[in-house]
Image: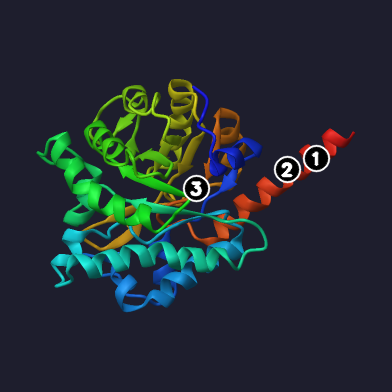
Amino acid sequence: MSPPTTPLADALARGPLVLDGGLSNQLVAQGCDLSDELWSARLLADAPEQIEAAHTAYVRAGARVLITASYQATFEGFARRGMGPERAAVLLRRSVELARRAAARAEREVWVAASVGPYGAMLADGSEYRGRYGLTVAELERFHRPRIEALAAAGPDVLALETVPDTDEARALLRAVRGCGVPVWLSYSVSGTGTRAGQPLSEAFAVAADDDQVVAVGVNCCEPADADRAVEVAARVTGKPVVVYPNSGEGWDAQARDWRGRATFDATRLGAWRSAGARLIGGCCRVGPERIAELAALVEAEGAAGAEGAEG
């Protein structure tokens, strides 16, 4: 199926767009304390200038798509901090506005993707990496719809339905976005050859194959090697552009509260991802501006080589 005709879809048809990297690791690098259930979403209220600065760091690195600080921002999460629905809606809208302000500093067009994280992100107990919360698809749809409506009203270029752990939540999200008037991408968090909940990737990607609102399908917040396998499956099953933004490859030690292991994210994976169908390419946790700058440089070099070949 061909992707729908939207400004973003048209941009993807002209070549790949580089996404930003991990927002949280950049905020930590700026000296922010994220030891809170709201994580980076707390800064929407307490230090919005830090979020804008983090977005700006990725713009300077060459990112063409900025993902907002709304991954863990929910009406329920803000309510636990004593913030009513009106205040929560203001903060959700602010997440898009902060990314827009940073995007305006770029010399060329930069797109804004409003992050819609999974239900488990609101629970702040790691269940976004397991899925299967004991809720029905209808219950998950009811949870997601108010936040989606608030974010869509802020006018992002696309909604990033990201770090989705299983097909039930994917179905709920795709139902919740109907009628919002904004295109979406659907991005699973995967492990090996399946979703975090264990469904085969071909089954997971098929959920979005016939949905005209979906401009890209893929994976994020996973091992780079797992992303390698998933890109090909997503393209083959859906026929849509693929979005891919894995983690650095390091592992989080919850007991020691520190990252362990070796980073395996390598910008030179770009060629294989592009060949397999990836058109939105970036990084997630622990992938900072330096790695995004490497990706951007490779995309620029490939574009220049292509232009020279066309002229010749």
Picture disc at residue 307:
1
Above or below, 189 relative to 283: above
Local SS, label 3: loop
Q: Position of residue 47 (x, y in %)?
A: 36, 78
Q: Residue at x 28, y 58 (%)?
A: 72
Q: Amino acid at mark 1?
A: Ala
Local SS, label 1: helix
Q: Quadrant of residue 254?
A: bottom left
Q: Is residue 111 left or right of residue 78?
A: right
Residue at the spot of label 3 = 265
Q: Amino acid at mark 2?
A: Gly
Tag 2 and tag 1, C-beta contact below 8 Å: yes
Above or below, 162 relative to 110: above
* Residue nearest the viewer, comparing 248 with 33: 33
Q: Position of residue 86 (x, y in %)?
A: 22, 67
Residue at the spot of label 2 = 303
Q: Is residue 282 visible?
A: yes
